[in-house]
Image (tube, coloured by chain):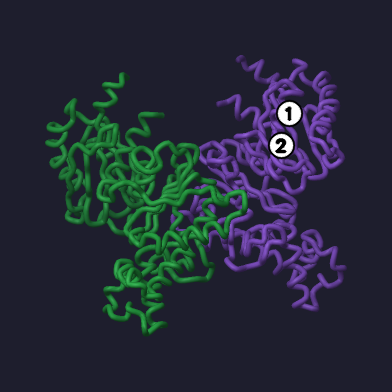
Chain colours: A green, B purple
């Protein structure tokens, strides 16, 4: 294939969330040529959802793809299985059981379709178009409502024997610790370092410190955003919420480093808006828990991709990943 | 290359330990054609050590290799770096600093030489000749004086960006827990699940239970072997030592499973002689700490390789790994 042809290839990247599904046409350089979205939760049947995607995307292909076609489709979705092309038992989607999503997409669109979970897609996106360009070993941690992860080792995503590798948010950082609201496990990383976990920590700490500014907010407004607002006003309790979160995250990251020895750990998602309030204690406790041979070597950085586009770019990267094999 | 030629290839596998160095000529089927050993700690200079290896091995090659030559050398050694072919700051070897071991071997033997740490070599050996034949995703845990590990993902060893990946013995399983006698870290897997860790646990537990049979042994005879002897005589304290060790190991394994989702975890080394006393609680606590999608899927098995030969076979597998790339 000539360089000219490569530059005219177009992939469709789709990011399926519980509420919204975003999609975009992406070229090999990572330019988003066109994008759009539909409501995920409006469709009781997955077939209707796919038909709606097709009706929305077909005109974009005709207008924006240089060859008026697609080279492939990449999908990031919760509980997506890379090997089987399925979405399995996704708690926040209406389609229950094991959904043969990739097969249905191939039938409707007539091109190859690959899928993986959203954090894996984000990791691929960072490797092709973001802060991890040129890296062969790194770990992506997404800190949002939950904590997700994508692990690249030797230039490839780790999928594991069943396609479900990389559930680092559910690793236990404090045995017998905080009970997870959904899985029931005790002391998982997600229970502390997700937006949900930070809210729980903040509610606990403000009850212990009546002087804290955090007590000026109603219960349902205590979240990582309001904790940040108090932290920049130098409220010691709010700062302590991020320090505590960073300690748990840093301890977990040290264990991850001793597993796959990555060149960098990329942090992504709403929680990283806390900036240095979170990053500094995270780095401190990561370094403190590492063996000397790993210390001072691992870059701990924030994602470079625009959050709104990252999921689409990451999903589209699944198409190029396969073409390059 | 014809099948006939392949069957006549011979690799030299070398396992360097602090006291003894074992070596063997190995064919592509994993048959050890000849073997021997020299004392590691007799040689102050690495050059003299290599010369002694050569003088011992040269006659074996002449006698046992069908083509009277070697196709390559694989070396398993503490703190060996795969990318650089070096042994770096190995605490239990006399050669200090960064030793360009592979280069010196190539100069003397005139064939390619690859090296990695001993646990990685053992993992390769299991994949080529042992319990992990045909597996593309598994984790090898060596439970000896220390706790080592080798991680295979997608059919390849994970080396990490610097060649030091897979230090799972030093991951923290209990933050703020038992202080490690050498690294100083608190609550690492090695502090509990190594032979050394088991001795510490046994000394602690027997002090708490004066009735235990463990109190019939002098202090310096308390080790995983004597604890096993008491356990088979149904001493509850000895059984509790393995149960406690298995809990810590199982909790750690659950975290490893959620990282790379292996088909199996292979346990290897002196400590596994404890058999079901250790294996049952390990499996229980691994399963208990897994997300439901991982439960009941991961085989937890003992190594199939003879311990005396495993290190040689594993090191020789480095040669075939490279030939197959």
Question: In this picture, is B241 found above or below B253?
Answer: below
**Hey, which quadrant is residue A230 in on the image?**
bottom left
Q: Residues within 10 Å of mark 1 (few under 14, many from 20)?
A: some
- Which residue extends farthest bottom? A210
The residue under the point 18% across, 42% down is A35
- Say which mark, if any, is on residue A137: none
Question: In this picture, is A91 found above or below A165?
Answer: below
* The N terminus of chain A lies in quadrant: top left
Q: Is residue B123 left or right of residue B68?
A: left
The residue under the point 66% across, 49% down is B148
Q: Secondary structure at mark 2?
A: strand
Task: Check disc 1 and report the residue beneath it.
Answer: B104
Given residues B257 and B300, the one toward you in this image is B257
Q: Chain of mark 1?
A: B
Given residues A235 and A193, the one toward you in this image is A235
Question: In this picture, is A265 found above or below B22?
Answer: below
Q: Secondary structure at mark 1?
A: helix
Q: Chain of mark 2?
A: B
The residue under the point 74% across, 49% down is B91
Task: Check disc 2 and report the residue beneath it.
Answer: B99
Residue A226, horizontal then vertical, whole percent: 30, 70
* The C terminus of chain A lies in quadrant: top left
């Amino acid at each position: 294939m000539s360089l000219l042809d490569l530059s005219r290839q177009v992939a469709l990247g789709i990011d399926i969330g519980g509420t919204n599904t975003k999609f975009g046409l992406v070229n090999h350089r990572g330019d988003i040529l066109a994008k759009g979205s539909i409501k995920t939760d409006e469709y009781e049947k997955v077939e209707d959802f796919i038909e709606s995607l097709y009706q929305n995307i077909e005109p974009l292909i005709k207008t924006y793809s240089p060859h008026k076609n697609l080279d492939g489709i990449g999908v990031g979705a919760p509980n997506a299985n890379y090997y089987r092309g399925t979405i399995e038992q996704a708690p926040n989607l209406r389609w229950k059981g094991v959904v043969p999503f990739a097969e249905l997409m191939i039938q409707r669109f007539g091109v190859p379709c690959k899928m993986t979970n959203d954090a894996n897609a984000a990791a691929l996106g960072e490797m092709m178009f973001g802060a991890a360009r040129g890296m062969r070993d790194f770990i992506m941690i997404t800190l949002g409502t939950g904590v997700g992860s994508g692990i690249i080792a030797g230039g490839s995503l780790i999928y594991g024997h069943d396609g479900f590798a990389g559930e680092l948010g559910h690793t236990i950082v404090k045995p017998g610790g905080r009970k997870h609201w959904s899985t029931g496990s005790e002391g998982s990383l997600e229970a502390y370092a997700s937006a949900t976990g930070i809210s729980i920590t903040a509610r606990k700490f403000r009850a212990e410190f009546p002087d804290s500014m955090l007590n000026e907010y109603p219960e349902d407004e205590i979240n990582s955003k309001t904790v940040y607002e108090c932290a920049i006003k130098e409220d010691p309790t709010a700062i302590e919420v991020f320090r505590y979160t960073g300690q748990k995250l840093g301890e977990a990251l040290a264990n991850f480093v001793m597993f796959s020895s990555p060149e960098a750990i990329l942090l992504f998602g709403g929680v990283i808006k806390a900036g240095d309030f979170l990053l500094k204690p995270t780095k401190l406790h990561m370094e403190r828990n590492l063996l000397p041979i790993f210390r001072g070597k691992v870059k701990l950085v924030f994602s470079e991709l625009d959050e709104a586009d990252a999921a689409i770019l990451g999903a589209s990267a699944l198409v190029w990943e396969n073409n390059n094999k």
